[in-house]
């Protein structure tokens, strides 16, 4: 995202906006909070049972299992048992899938969930209150409970948008207790995901990643019930327009190797922003690239670097909205180039501080961008391929395609139902076209993660979203008061 200098006028404009917000009544700050740890109290989640989704349009995203114009999906104890035109399961609960698309849940491969807490302050049109200014200033004041509430708010939005797996790109881990809090929030939401343990906002470049804390979190939390996995996120490597502002770290290749070696000694994967000149060539020369590395924001790669990525089995996560908000001087979204050169790609939200989670909208943007830049003759792109990008390709990126990403018997039941009868959808002909060109998160009817029905008929089954939002606002206002900001 583009940086803008702060000046008196923009700061005053931002202060006016915040003053209006602070005039809105909100509840008192919580006086005590429970311990956020693997052993601490956890939220009650719906039980896994046995059910059949009947009569839906079934999109399997499995090349060996045909889609069904009308079909059933049978789930038992969190696993998919069968996908067929008709399933015989007389003892199973029946979920009516009529008028709905049944498909794998979306997999979001890069999302700074902790920053969701800062929605009351981040503005797209006020540079002094832009994402980087707000997160850098207030992120340094986060306590573990702030991290918990931010991630809880973000995961609630993820589920409401049909995201069943999220890569929590946690680049404000101020202590192992902050990591515990974020993992606890993911656990309490019931979402599947990877937690990418990272640095903290404002961390000095020569300060190594907390390898001991990382090892402790792995020991305490993994493998658990298998829903959550662990990795690291690295500070930027090499020159970067964003790092140069001091908002993010900017490591040399040697400093990065220090952190990456610590992660690899624990068997953990690595993710890295490429917000600036591509570091791929220098990292390749240092022998640091492999299938355990995910890059984010494909803007400035060369054909040679894309060939390196393909050869090394690496992947690139694309965040269409965030990348389109950057100046064209920082490059273009190289979605079409990655497709043409056979590099693994996945889809992500980036953050939800001043825009929202909308997998359908992101797919729509990528299709429009592809047509605008290269057309569909040179690099053919189908709607089904785009839906695969948001589902199975994300599972491949995160190394969990054996568990999720398609409606395949024996995989875990991460499933969403999308209404096709809503005003913005009906009547539907081709379901893939409808998902990419017409759908939005409001069409999500049911969300199932690991066999648990977390949303049904467009409502949470256990999570109290109103309380989650109140808790987030209380924490945000306390942070703002602590910072005495803006001032």
Image: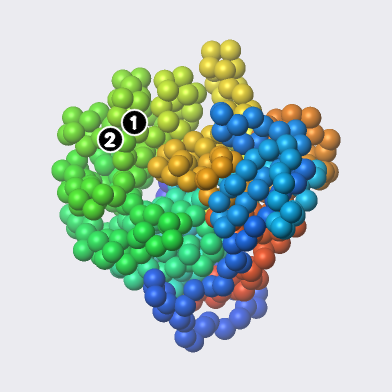
Q: Decide: is 361 above or below 199.
A: above
x, y percentage for residue 418? 71, 45
On the question of residue 235 being in view, the answer is no
Question: Residue 428 or 251: which is nearer the viewer?
Answer: 428
Q: Are marks 2 and 1 in contact (CB under 8 Å)?
A: yes
Label annotation for residue 282: none
Say what secondary structure mark 2 lies in.
loop
Horizontal arrangement in the rendering, residue 356 relative to residue 230 (left or right):
right
Say what secondary structure mark 1 lies in.
loop
Q: Who's the residue at 57% across and 83% down the image?
A: 28
Q: Which residue is mark 1?
A: 313
Q: Decide: is 9 above or below 461.
A: above
x, y percentage for residue 59? 65, 36
Q: Who's the residue at 65% across and 74% down the image?
A: 24
Q: Which residue is mark 2?
A: 290
Q: Who's the residue at 54% across and 73% down the image?
A: 43
- Residue 456 lies in what quarter of the image? bottom right
x, y percentage for residue 224? 39, 62
**Colour scheme of the rendered structure:** rainbow
């Amino acid at each position: 995202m583009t940086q803008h200098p702060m000046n008196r006028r923009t700061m005053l404009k931002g202060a006016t906006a915040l003053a209006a917000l602070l005039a809105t009544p909100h509840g008192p700050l919580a006086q005590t909070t429970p311990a956020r740890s693997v052993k601490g109290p956890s939220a009650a989640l719906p039980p896994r049972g046995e059910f059949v989704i009947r009569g839906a349009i079934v999109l399997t995203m499995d090349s060996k299992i045909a889609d069904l114009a009308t079909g059933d999906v049978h789930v038992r104890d969190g696993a998919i048992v069968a996908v067929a035109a008709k399933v015989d399961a007389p003892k199973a609960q029946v979920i009516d899938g009529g008028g709905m698309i049944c498909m794998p849940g979306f997999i979001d491969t890069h999302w700074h969930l902790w920053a969701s807490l800062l929605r009351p302050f981040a503005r797209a049109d006020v540079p002094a209150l832009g994402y980087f200014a707000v997160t850098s200033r207030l992120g340094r004041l986060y306590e573990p409970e702030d991290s918990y509430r931010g991630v809880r708010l973000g995961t609630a939005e993820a589920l409401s948008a049909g995201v069943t797996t999220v890569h929590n790109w946690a680049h404000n881990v101020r202590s192992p207790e902050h990591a515990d809090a974020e993992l606890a929030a993911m656990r309490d939401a019931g979402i599947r995901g990877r937690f990418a343990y990272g640095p903290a906002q404002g961390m000095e470049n020569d300060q190594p990643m907390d390898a001991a804390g990382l090892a402790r979190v792995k020991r305490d939390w993994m493998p658990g019930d298998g829903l959550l996995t662990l990795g690291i996120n690295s500070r930027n490597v090499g020159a970067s327009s964003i790092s140069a502002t001091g908002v993010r770290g900017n490591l040399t290749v040697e400093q990065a190797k220090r952190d990456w070696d610590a992660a690899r000694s624990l068997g953990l994967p690595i993710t890295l922003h490429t917000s600036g000149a591509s570091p791929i060539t220098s990292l390749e020369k240092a022998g640091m690239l492999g299938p355990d590395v995910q890059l984010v924001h494909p803007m400035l790669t060369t054909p040679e670097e894309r060939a390196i990525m393909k050869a090394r089995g690496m992947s690139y996560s694309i965040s269409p909205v965030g990348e389109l908000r950057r100046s064209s001087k920082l490059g273009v979204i190289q979605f079409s180039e990655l497709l043409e050169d056979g590099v693994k790609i996945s889809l992500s939200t980036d953050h939800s501080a001043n825009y929202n989670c909308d997998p359908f909208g992101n797919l729509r943007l990528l299709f429009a961008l592809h047509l605008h830049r290269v057309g569909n003759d040179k690099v053919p792109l189908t709607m089904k391929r785009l839906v695969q990008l948001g589902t199975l390709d994300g599972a491949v990126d995160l190394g969990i395609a054996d568990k999720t990403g398609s409606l395949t018997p024996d995989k875990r039941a991460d499933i969403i139902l999308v209404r096709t009868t809503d005003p913005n959808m009906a009547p539907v002909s081709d379901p893939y076209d409808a998902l990419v060109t017409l759908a939005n998160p409001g069409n999500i009817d049911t969300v199932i993660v690991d066999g648990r029905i977390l949303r049904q008929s467009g409502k949470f089954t256990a999570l109290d979203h109103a309380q989650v939002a109140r808790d987030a606002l209380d924490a945000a206002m306390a942070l703002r008061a602590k910072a005495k900001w803006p001032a």
